[in-house]
Image (tube, helix red, strand yellow):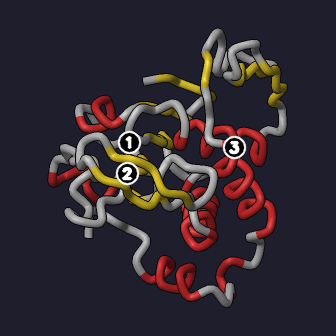
Amino acid sequence: MQLIKEKLYTMNKIEAESFEFTKGKTYAIISVFTPDAENGNRNKANFIIPEDQKENINILYSGFHDALESETAYDLEKRDYITLYPLSEDESLAIALFIKLNYDIVDYFVVHCEMGVSRSAGIVRAILKWKYGRNKIFQSPNGYIQELYEEEFYKNKMYKYNSHVYKSVLESLRNLSDYKNHPNLAINTFLENKNRYGD
């Protein structure tokens, strides 16, 4: 688990599933999982949320592959080829809306994916750029992106963030101004059901 900036945390799935929620504090969580065509949402994180805490915790589940574009890849576990589906425009809009609805009003904002270094890092970087606008990017020789910010966040950390996720979420954050009257059906549906506890 890594504190990035004030209330903003990023982590992997294992850390998210063992995360201990502080009573009386409010949380917004973007839980990114890898979709499974055969087994539905089996890859979703299972959060341990006390009954008296549920009203203080708002979760957005978002399923997409760690890919830059739609492509076919070999799955070692399934021993077969599968189609990878990157972050879609609808999901990007839903993520941006969730951020706008929650970021300024919760005590903690958490973003996680399977490993906590690519998809979640792309979302976190978009939040930082949109909210604070202070990131400086340096390309290291091994191809990883080193995030250097004016303050302490991402200090001495190496992240190979998903650039498609970063660009899509940032664009959605910048363009999603009048979201309450957005013509996109996914946005309207999301507004009617902001809490996604795994349905």
Q: x%, y% of residue 181?
A: 68, 87
Disc 2, SS? strand
Q: CA distance from mark 2 to mark 3?
A: 17 Å
**Label 3 amino acid?**
Ser
Residue 55 shows in this picture: yes
Q: x%, y% of residue 116?
A: 46, 32
11 horizontally vs 188: left or right: left
3 horizontally vs 35: left or right: right
Determine the residue positioned at 45% across, 83% down.
192
The residue beneath circle 2 is: 33
Is 52 rendered above or below residue 91?
above
Q: Residues within 10 Å of mark 1 (few under 14, many from 20)?
A: few
Quarter placement of the N terminus: top left
Dividing the picture into quarters, in which one does residue 97 lie? bottom right
The residue beneath circle 3 is: 163
Q: Point out the frontmost of discs 1 and 3.
A: 3
Dividing the picture into quarters, in which one does residue 188 lie? bottom right
The residue beneath circle 1 is: 25
Disc 3, SS? helix
**Label 1 amino acid?**
Lys
Q: Point out the frontmost of discs 2 and 1.
A: 2
Determine the residue positioned at 49% across, 33% down.
10
Q: CA distance from mark 1 to mark 3?
A: 32 Å
Q: Residues within 10 Å of mark 3 (few under 14, many from 20)?
A: some
The disc, 2 or 1, on the residue closer to the chain's N-terminal end is 1
Is 101 rendered above or below residue 27?
below
Q: x%, y% of residue 29?
A: 43, 49
The disc, 1 or 3, on the residue closer to the chain's N-terminal end is 1
Q: CA distance from mark 2 to mark 1?
A: 25 Å
Quarter placement of the C terminus: bottom left
Residue at far left of view: 51
